Image (spheres, rainbow, N blue to C red):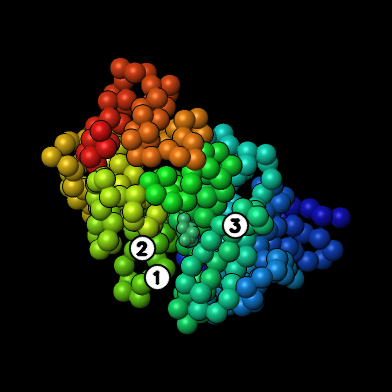
């Protein structure tokens, strides 16, 4: 006899959150039958295999410290749950493949592994424990980023190199950030930066900045003809910047306690249409117009078509999509 139960977890980054779990023969499993049976396993430092499903005698998980092996699992399981809810609530999408099937998460991958990744072949995401095995990569925007690679694979399937690769990466950053805003956790105030809590470079700084990608020291703020030569995690910056501008508009802003000063090409001004509409434009473009070989020029065309479908070809939304692309030199 298996039943849904409401537990409570304390993650490394999410703080204290509710978790839907399985109650079965006197114990609990970190598995969520209300969201496609998504579950989380412990790899205990291994780099292969499915890992061991987390079980517990009580329905209270983790203690917020990375030294407790359940804490990163709470982040991962909660991240998968909120990502599921974000796609459902924002786009009406029923899971990564829109088929109601959940993905699973594996934590404690390898030793001192400073990355996280999605793998379509296992339909799962995997998190390392970071430097000294004490900085797990389980932040919410990372979870949303990795799961969104699964959505891209199931839809436009953007090739993971050149400009299409940058658009693939940006899609994961855009929806990963969308997940963070959707969850709106006190322990993880939403913002337009990626990985701001995980200290991935050991300097306390975020991994990427959507408002001004060049703040990472490498990503360009606007398009040039050599963009496609960059690693996809840098060529993504131009689309991330487009998304920030379309959501919030150009100029100096303080949002939720975070300060942004987003540069634009030629001083092009952009009036933000709000994050929710910007997300819907990107999602419709991804699922309707983008293909494996879409480049930045085609992304402009595809998002304009999406905006015309959603809001009309004479709408403010349509005009601001055009303005935001022009502001990052995509014409
Ligand atoms: N964490 C990285 C990403 O999702 C892994 C990779 O390089 N593909 O982009
Ligand atoms: Zn990625």
Q: Nearer the viewer, mark 3 or mark 1?
A: 3
Q: Are marks 2 and 1 in contact (CB under 8 Å)?
A: yes
Which sits in the foreground, 135 or 23? 135
**Residue drawn 70% across and 66% down?**
50
Q: Is residue 65 visible?
A: no
Give the mark, 3 or 1, whose residue is nearer the N terminus.
3
SS type, badge 1: loop
Q: Position of residue 155 (x, y in %)?
A: 55, 38
Is the CB of the residue bearing disc 3 within 8 angstroms of ligand 1? Answer: no
Mark positioned earlier in the residue sequence (2 or 1): 1
Which of marks 3 and 2 precedes in the sequence? 3
User: Is 54 displayed left or right of 242 in the figure?
Assistant: right
Please name the residue that numbered disc 1 is placed on: 200
Q: Which residue is mark 2?
A: 207
Viewer-proximal residue, 143 or 82?
143
Looking at the rendering, in which quadrant would you find the C terminus? top left
Q: Examine the rendered structure and indicate whether residue 271 appears above or below residue 200.
A: above
Q: Nearer the viewer, mark 2 or mark 3?
A: 3
The quadrant in which the N terminus is found is: bottom right
Give the x, y percent position of residue 152: 52, 44
Question: Measuring 47% from the left and 30% from the top, which residue is drawn there?
Answer: 289
Residue placed at 82% from the left, 55% from the top?
2
For disc 3, the marked residue is 119
Alpha carbons under labels 3 and 1: distance apart: 21 Å
Left-right relation of 227 to 1: left
Give coordinates of residue 305: x percent, y percent: 40, 25
């Amino acid at each position: 006899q298996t039943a849904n139960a409401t537990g409570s977890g304390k993650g490394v980054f999410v703080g204290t959150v509710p978790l839907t779990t399985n109650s079965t023969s006197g114990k609990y499993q970190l598995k969520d039958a209300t969201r496609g049976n998504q579950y989380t396993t412990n790899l205990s430092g291994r780099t292969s295999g499915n890992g061991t499903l987390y079980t517990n005698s009580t329905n209270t998980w983790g203690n917020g410290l990375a030294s407790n092996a359940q804490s990163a699992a709470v982040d991962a399981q909660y991240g998968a749950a909120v990502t599921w809810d974000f796609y459902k609530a924002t786009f009406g999408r029923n899971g990564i493949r829109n088929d109601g099937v959940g993905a699973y998460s594996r934590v404690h991958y390898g030793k001192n592994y400073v990355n996280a990744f999605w793998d379509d072949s296992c339909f799962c995401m995997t998190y390392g424990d970071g430097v000294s095995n004490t900085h797990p990569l389980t932040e919410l925007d990372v979870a949303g980023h990795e799961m969104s690679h699964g959505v891209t694979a199931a839809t436009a399937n953007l090739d993971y190199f050149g400009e299409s690769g940058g658009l693939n990466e940006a899609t994961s950053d855009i929806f990963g950030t969308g997940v963070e805003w959707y969850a709106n956790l006190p322990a993880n105030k939403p913002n337009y930066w990626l990985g701001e809590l995980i200290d991935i470079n050991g300097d306390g700084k975020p991994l990427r900045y959507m408002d001004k990608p060049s703040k990472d020291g490498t990503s360009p703020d606007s398009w040039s003809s050599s963009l496609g030569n960059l690693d996809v995690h840098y060529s993504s910056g131009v689309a991330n910047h487009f998304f920030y501008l379309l959501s919030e508009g150009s100029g100096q802003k303080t949002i939720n306690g975070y300060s942004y000063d987003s540069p634009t090409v030629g001083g092009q001004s952009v009036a933000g249409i709000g994050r929710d509409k910007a997300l819907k434009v990107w999602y419709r473009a991804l699922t309707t117009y983008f293909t494996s070989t879409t480049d930045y020029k085609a992304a402009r065309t595809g998002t304009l078509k999406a905006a015309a479908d959603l809001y009309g070809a004479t709408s403010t939304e349509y005009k601001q999509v055009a303005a935001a692309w022009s502001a990052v030199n995509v014409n």
